Image: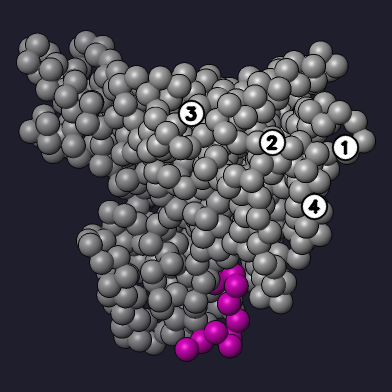
Amino acid sequence: MIYYSCSYIPMEVMLGSACEFHRITSSAPTSCHELGCNLCGYAKTVYKKGMELNSDDCLLIADSCDAMRRVGDLLSELSSAKVFILRLPWKRDADAVKFLCRELVGLTAFLQNSGITVDPHTGINRFNDIVEYVQANEMLVEGTELSRLYLSALDGRKAEVSPSNAKSDGSGKRIALSGGVTDLKSFDNAVEKAGAITVSNETCLGRRPFSSKTADNIEPLVAIAERLLRWRSPCGRFSEPFPASDDRADATVFVVPKFCDFFDFVRAGDNGKSYRVELDFPLNSDGQLTTRIGALMEKSDFRSVSHAEEGSTVIYAGVDSGSTTTNGVLVDGNGRILFSKTLKTGIRASNTAEVLIQEMTEFSRKNGNQIGKCISTGYGRLLVSSASDKITEISCHARGVFELYPEARGIIDIGGQDSKVIRLNSGGSVEDFAMNDKCAAGTGRFLEVMASALELGTEEMSSLARKSKKDISISSVCTVFAESEVVSLIGLGERIEDISAGLFKAIARRVGAMYSRLGSPEPLVFTGGVARNPGVVDALNKLFGTEILIPEIPDIMGAYGAALFARESSSECDIG
């Protein structure tokens, strides 16, 4: 069996043999001392698969980046499989074609020496047949069926296409996927949960390897080299421009692989229809990806504001189901808050949300009102069965803040388990956003763990921090490592006041990095439960050198925004 790691490994050569082959996409990543930590999940996946192979297998690796070069070197020494590393040129001129041809000669010789006969002419014919099949069918399918078409083709097979069952009804948003390698199955699932569907895939696991046929009228290895270098421009390995957004899609998601040498966060030419998201391989948090996709979709939505008549008995509900707390808000037809409450989410988010909705319903009835519509938001928004619509917390925080502070252009939201920064335009719509959802660093949970290590309450930390006389830097952003650092500082005799101040500065720096990436928009509003903590507020004010606006009840801004959206999308027929 032949296994390969990159679409720069020529399928024509593998198709020219009688041996089965498989593009590595599904093995879970691993790590070892020799690999180190700062490698993308896909490089670790290839390493793990390589270590599982036996002496009858061949593993083909392209040195597409430093990580894969390191993986290839290790597996050449440690794997039981026969390993070949294909070196790639950095240009695509005539010399680059000659260079790659020499590498392809080495590849065919490697396979021949491994007992695998290769006929490049046959391989080219078979490859061109697959290209024709993919190009004829990729416009007929979407979502998981589109991914299945590409993944099957990467293994030299033609997936059976049933267009009648593969097309959506056209009511959802359409996503184009570009950038680096990602876990297609999990990506498609997250997109569908967000109410959208993948209609285009320009990654190396998508249409890019099948964008053109291989010439069959020149020397075969030259033709293969020219074909490989012809479609390389979208690859992050090279410095050439990326293609424009797909006109067929409502938005483009550009995947930035974690720890990647080549894919960055920002490139000139990004627009309102594009969003860059850092993803590891495989995905380990499709819930957060669903939030990102949903927020991207909502960025371009136009929501008209329609106020209810004075004295209307119809009111509107918003529920923010977060990882730590669940917030509920009721507003009247003019957007005034009539009721708000916060509950601990606990282990059953759906039950907590329904308890809160029931309480809001009873409040409404006692006051002679009816809930016209309920919209849910937050990490658990999809679990709130009573809600008639689901909107991401990105959009809801923006809507709630803009209602109270129409001059606001930036929002920092720090919750129990994640933090986010949002940039608004003059109309209150989301222009861009950044999220920290990888760990608890810089969140309410981080604060709780540090307070516990100091044997203090979070409010006590704030009071003590204001008495600090020494600048202490907490270098670790990881909650676990920061806790160890705090214990060490205590052991060294550092004052609790100084350690507390250092911890607040660490939180501020973590959030400040995201804030500066979005251009440091002002005026700035601070929302979320952590906005109640004076120590964090002081640290942010000092870091940014500007006064931060804080709502009276910062915890409920997401639920407030959801309630406002419910009001604006409702009509009398929504009354239940």
Q: Secondary structure at mark 4?
A: helix
* Magenta range: 567-576
Label 3 sits on residue: 82
Mark 1 Cα within 10 Å, few/some/many (few <14, many 20+)?
some
Counting residues from the start of the chain, the first of labels 2 and 1 encountered is: 2
In this view, the mark in front (3 or 4): 3
Q: CA distance from mark 2 to mark 1?
A: 18 Å
**Mark identifier at residue 129:** 4
Residue type highlighted by circle 1:
Ala
Q: Secondary structure at mark 2?
A: loop
Residue type highlighted by circle 4:
Asp
**Mark identifier at residue 118:** 2
Label 1 sits on residue: 215
Counting residues from the start of the chain, the first of labels 3 and 4 encountered is: 3
Counting residues from the start of the chain, the first of labels 1 and 4 encountered is: 4
- Contact flag, marks 4 and 2 (Cβ < 8 Å): no
Q: Is residue 118 above or below residue 125?
A: above
Is residue 144 one of those drawn in magenta? no
In this view, the mark in front (2 or 1): 2
Q: Is residue 471 above or below residue 141?
A: above
Answer left or right for 322 relative to 11: left
Counting residues from the start of the chain, the first of labels 3 and 1 encountered is: 3
Q: Nearer the viewer, residue 252 or 185?
A: 185
Q: Secondary structure at mark 1?
A: loop
Q: Is residue 38 above or below residue 255?
A: above
Q: CA distance from mark 3 to mark 4?
A: 29 Å
Mark 2 Cα within 10 Å, few/some/many (few <14, many 20+)?
many
